[in-house]
């Protein structure tokens, strides 16, 4: 079991971490920690709330997809924040979260995770963590932002359903030994607080620099699927607003704000 008292005590040691984790709530099993955090947001609960669960019955991915969330082995958390940034800046919180995940995983395991734009963290080319941003605006208060994070920590290969085995992994599988989930969570909350502070201080250039440095996507040939279109091209750079710039075969460029990408293997003649 995760130890909320230990987590709370360690978060209190750093003022910037305390800011995003004033309250830490652990549930045994919930439908979705994001759903609970959004409900709290709609009830006017202030920012700085961390909702944790040992299992989720209806863990959510993006676009109605599901997040596989078995009990007692992984991390499932949602942060409720009320940031002062303008709404067009909010997608940057997803990138800030992916950088924080990379830094925390690197520090706790020595592995070299990479970011797959826009919201996946990969280890050995397989997905180890996913991020889901959702927001709630009741008009009266500062709009809320819910950041959902799922990390596969101590799952075994057999624990994954067959359809996920080719694309997903866990830290334990990559490291061949179990990880202390409390320590990883504390490192993650510290890293999140650092990255959010950069955004608050208007230093998004530093954030984007880290995203580019840790990106698995750049330089790769990719297929892009957006809600409106699908095409192929080369991933060039992540821009200041978090968009991915793609160079097409005819040399023209497109900026993608929302969508999924697939890394394509280049076939050389
Ligand atoms: C995501 O969506 O990657 C966002 C996942 C966010 C999960 C957290 S857990 C705490 C919080 N509460 C919630 O209800 N959700 C958040 P997306 O990019 O749409 O990826 C979803 C896809 O990843 C699925 O369609 C599967 O292919 C794959 N997938 C599902 N479960 C997985 C897992 N445990 N590990 C790796 N891949 C998984």
Image (cartoon, rainbow, N blue to C red):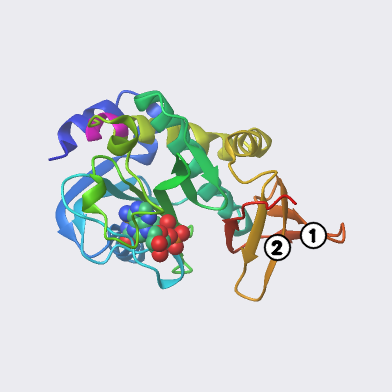
Q: Quadrant of residue 73?
A: top left
- Residue 260, quarter of picture: bottom right
Q: Which residue of the protein is positioned furthest toward the bottom in this rendering?
A: 228
- Taking the spot 12% from the left edge, 40% from the top edge, the residue there is 1
What x and y, as percent, mark residue 190?
39, 30
Magenta region includes residue 183: yes
Nearest the viewer among 27 and 245 is: 245
Label 2 sits on residue: 232
Residue 212 occupies quadrant: top right
Q: Position of residue 10 (x, y in %)?
A: 26, 26
- For the point 40% across and 31% down, which residue is it? 104
**Would you call the spot at circle 1 few (<14 residues within 10 Å), some (14-19), or many (20 or more)?**
some
Whether residue 176 can be seen here: yes
- Which residue is disc 1 drawn over? 248
Contact? badges 2 and 1 (CB < 8 Å): yes
Residue at coordinates 30% horizontally, 49% vertically from top-left? 77
Seen from the viewer's position, the closer of residues 267 and 111 is: 267
On the picture, is 212 further left or further right than 40? right
Residue 231 or residue 148, whichever sits in front: 231
Residue shown at 62% from the left, 52% from the top:
265
Asked if residue 193 lies left or right of residue 42, the reply is: right
Q: Does 63 appear above or below 34? A: below
Secondary structure at badge 1 equals: loop
Q: Is residue 245 magenta?
A: no
Q: Position of residue 159 (x, y in %)?
A: 21, 52
Q: Position of residue 158 (x, y in %)?
A: 22, 50
**Range of magenta residues:** 180-184
The image shows residue 258, relative to residue 177, as above or below, that is below
Within 8 Å of ligand 1, the CB of disc 2? no
């Amino acid at each position: 079991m995760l130890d909320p008292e230990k987590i709370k005590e360690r978060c209190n040691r750093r003022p910037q971490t305390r800011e995003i984790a004033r309250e830490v709530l652990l549930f045994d099993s919930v439908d979705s920690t994001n759903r609970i955090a959004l409900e709290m947001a709609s009830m006017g609960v202030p920012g700085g709330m961390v909702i944790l669960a040992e299992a989720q019955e209806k863990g959510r991915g993006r676009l109605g997809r599901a997040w596989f969330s078995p009990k007692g082995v992984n991390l499932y958390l949602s942060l409720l924040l009320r940031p002062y940034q303008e709404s067009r800046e909010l997608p940057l919180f997803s990138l800030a979260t992916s950088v924080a995940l990379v830094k925390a995983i690197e520090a706790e395991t020595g592995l070299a995770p990479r970011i797959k734009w826009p919201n996946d963290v990969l280890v050995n080319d397989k997905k180890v963590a996913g991020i889901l941003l959702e927001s709630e605006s009741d008009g009266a208060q500062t709009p809320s932002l819910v950041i959902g994070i799922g990390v596969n920590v101590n799952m075994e290969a057999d624990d994954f359903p067959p359809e996920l085995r080719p694309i997903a992994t866990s830290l334990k599988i990559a490291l061949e030994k179990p990880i202390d989930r409390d320590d990883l969570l504390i490192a993650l909350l510290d890293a999140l607080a650092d990255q959010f502070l950069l955004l608050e201080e208007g230093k998004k250039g530093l954030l984007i620099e880290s995203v580019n440095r840790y990106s698995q996507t750049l330089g790769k040939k990719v297929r892009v699927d957006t809600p409106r279109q699908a095409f192929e091209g080369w991933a060039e750079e992540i821009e200041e607003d978090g968009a991915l710039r793609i160079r097409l075969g005819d040399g023209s460029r497109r900026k993608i704000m929302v969508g999924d990408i697939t890394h394509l293997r280049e076939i050389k003649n």
